[in-house]
Image (cartoon, grey):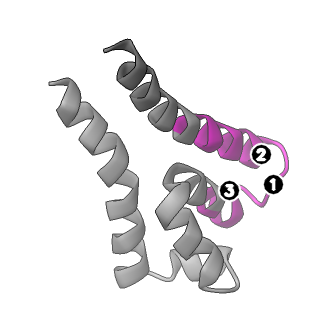
Amino acid sequence: MCCVLVLLAFVGPRAALVLLWLFTDYLSRAYDAFLLPFLGFLFLPWTTLAFAIAQNDLGGLNGLGLIVVILGVLADIGVLGGGARRRWAS
């Protein structure tokens, strides 16, 4: 069961980014170039989604938008850190 949750944490935001890129202009409204969302897809997918939400729906990186991006960073750190902790415990 734990492996399924880890798999969903890694694949879930990346699948959402791919679907947003294929079927909407949501990411292109938040990002000017292709490189930054691509790097976000590879390394920080939760943060990439959070930034797109902040830019499109919350008016940028002020107030609630900044809180959403910080939560995205914490989610990315949590996904990566949880796997490292389990690796060292066994």
Q: CA distance from mark 2 to mark 3?
A: 7 Å
Residue 21 left/right relative to 57: left
Secondary element under disc 3, as helix, strand or loop, is helix
Q: Amino acid at mark 1?
A: Leu
Q: Position of residue 47 (x, y in %)?
A: 60, 52
Q: Are marks 2 and 3 in contact (CB under 8 Å)?
A: yes
- Which residue position holds label 2? 66
Residue 50 left/right relative to 58: left
- Which residue position holds label 3? 54
In magenta segment, residue 19:
no
Secondary element under disc 1, as helix, strand or loop, is loop
- Which residue position holds label 1? 61
Q: Are marks 1 and 3 in contact (CB under 8 Å)?
A: yes
Majority SS type along the magenta span: helix
Residue depicted at 54% across the width and 42% down the height:
76
Of residues 35 and 31, the one drawn nearer to the viewer in this rendering: 35
